[in-house]
Image: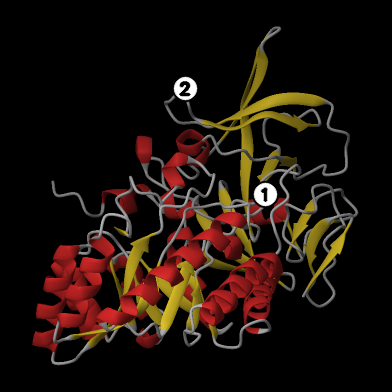
Amino acid sequence: MEYSRGGMLFFVLGEYPVATVPKANLLPISAEVNAQGHLVLGGCDALDLVQEFGSPLYVYDEPTLRAAAEAYQLAFTSRYANSQVLYACKAFVNPALAKVLAGYGLGFDVVSGGEAAVLQAASVPADRVYFHGNNKTPQELREALEWGIGRVVIDGLQEIALLDELAGVSGHRQPVLIRVSPEVDPHTHHHTTTGVLDSKFGFPISTGQAQEAIRRTLAAANLDLRGLHFHLGSPIFEMEPYERAVRLVLEFASQMREEGLVLREFSPGGGFAVAYTEEDAPPSPGAYAEAIVDTLTAACRDLDMETPLLVVEPGRAMVARAGVALYTVGAIKDVPNIRTYVAVDGGMGDNIRPALYDARYEAIAAGCVTRPATERVTIAGKYCESGDVLVRDAHLPPVQPGDVLAIPVSGAYGPSMASTYNWNGRPAIVLVGGGKARLLRRRDSYADMMATDVV
């Protein structure tokens, strides 16, 4: 369920109100402050979690995951009954998390054989899975077909012939979508913009390549073309790019009816934004749903088209706010009249987004949440790179070595893009709720990191 207060969106689930702690719009909905002034997540003291599981530690809050899943499903199905919500696995997935999300009734979108293997390990039904990617390998496609994957989203001319051949060998017609590029700028970081002409993703409409892809797919004996997909990028804070792209792609689909295209499914992708800082004001799930659904229904009416199944793919919007990264302070370096560096035991190895995208985060002193933030510091990582900075100009109370810092909105892309750079292991991950913590992934040991090396 969602409601507004002071122009800001809040999720509510059960007895968990959002606005109970500083930076409440960034923290999971279960966040509280206990009598000791410690940050509490899912009923678990953050300092106790670090004591038990070590740090860095990624904490996922199950009430927030459930609330986000329910919010997106309700936002779309209440406005357009023939809707399906998929979770975009690239944001972060492992078998345990997949089981949790599947229990909320979500489908999934994957972009690799590895992500598909995770869902198989979690016993996710194959028909609830869509396979994306601009360069799926023959092996990945064979594995997907053997599993009985629900949809393959075609993203290259060579893929059409390859998939047709492999589907023929497997003995069934594979349902597919075609990814097109509407050439709409979503006004986000250029590294995460995907729906423009100069992109490795999608068949451009303006060049005639999208038309050619549809013709070839309709002619393929072993492919069943169900509809069209596009994805503009992420994160998108504005409605206008969705509205313009939905209209453009549906007009294109209408034109292709003469060539035999029957639009049974339509996907505008995902890319829905979240608040990483207190200044961010992302639209609500309902705002995205209203813009997409209103444009879809109006365009279908104007074009005299049957309304298709609507498929949306939130990933970041499902898990970002649910995740909090916990770090332990180590060295502190004061450069007079320049800045103070507070180094922690993680960094770009577990969250490369600040180095890669100039992503902005905020930080909280988990052991003294309500103490006045009188210091301005830069939170740096332990990796051997000058660019290994997690938060610039963070406002904190005075901290010292051994203190625990929390960085909210860390649930998306940090763990999934994590590396073992400098031979530092990836952090442990826990799921919290109801005062209990469950290990989703243990911390990498030195032996884990060397397990695939051949001596």
Residue 283 pos. (x, y %): 70, 58
Q: For mark 2, give the secondary structure.
A: loop
Residue 154 pos. (x, y %): 27, 69
Q: Which mark is residue 28?
A: none
Task: Return the residue nearer the eye: 324 or 329.
Answer: 324
Amino acid type assigned to the residue bearing label 1 in the image: Pro
Task: Return the residue nearer the eye: 116 or 373.
Answer: 116
Q: For mark 1, give the secondary structure.
A: loop
Residue linked to disc 1 = 408
User: 10 Å neighbourhood of mark 2: few (<14), some, or many (≥20)?
Assistant: few
Residue linked to disc 2 = 386
Residue 57 pos. (x, y %): 57, 51
Can the viewer see residue 432 in this picture?
no
Residue 89 figure quarter: bottom left
- Identified at 58% across, 79% down, the residue is 297
Residue 184 pos. (x, y %): 46, 52
Task: Return the residue nearer the eye: 143 or 370.
Answer: 143
- Identified at 41% across, 64% down, the residue is 230
Q: Left or right: 195 with respect to 165?
A: right
* Position of 50 relative to 69 (above/below): above
Can the viewer see residue 424 in this picture?
yes
User: 10 Å neighbourhood of mark 1: few (<14), some, or many (≥20)?
Assistant: many
